[in-house]
Image (spheres, helix red, strand yellow):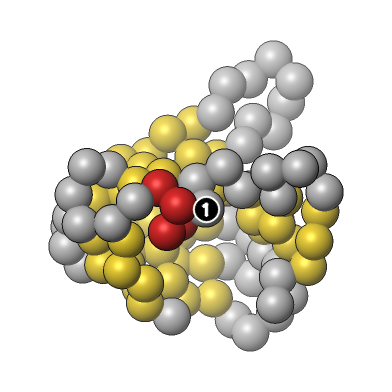
Amino acid sequence: MTFHVETDADVHGDHWEVHPEAQEVVACLAGGIRLYFRPEQPDEVEEEVAVAAGSAVIVPRGRWYRIAWTALATSCPSLCRAAAGWRSGGDGAWRPDD
């Protein structure tokens, strides 16, 4: 899947998601995004990774993450094996990805 991003709402920056059965490659063709990894331990902080045009990040299987937009229009392909993932909505409820 490739998506075009012009605002934080385009990437649902306030939603966390996870793919328990597969890694995911998040690439950036133009512009830039920030990828945040949820802390794995209570005393840790979010890990932020800047993804610039022409680069990619592999999201490990089972790792919660979210994407945030930068101030640039962005085109990002995302590759993941066709397996269900989970997303945390702004209301805190966990829902399967469609």
Observer-nearest of 21 and 69: 69
Left/right of residue 70 with respect to residue 79 in the rendered view: left
Looking at the picture, does residue 31 appear above or below residue 34? below
Vertical side of 22 occupied by 93: above or below = above
Where residue 81 appears, x then y in whole percent?
A: 59, 81
Residue at image point 70% right, 70% down: 97
Q: Going by the image, does 20 lie left or right of 72?
A: right
Q: Position of residue 16 (x, y in %)?
A: 63, 48
Q: Which residue is mark 1?
A: 12
Residue 74 at x, y percent in the picture: 24, 60
Q: Quadrant of residue 96?
A: bottom right
Q: Quadrant of the N terminus?
A: bottom left
Left or right: 40, with 3 as reference point: right
Residue lying at the far top in this picture: please name it.
43
**Residue at 64% over, 31% down:** 39
Under mark 1, the amino acid is: His
Residue 18: quadrant of the picture: bottom right
Toward the viewer: 35 or 60? 35
Q: In what element is the residue under mark 1? A: loop
Q: In the rendering, at what x and y percent does residue 22 appear?
A: 64, 70
- Residue at (69, 33) in percent of width and height: 40
For residue 28, say whether it is visible.
no
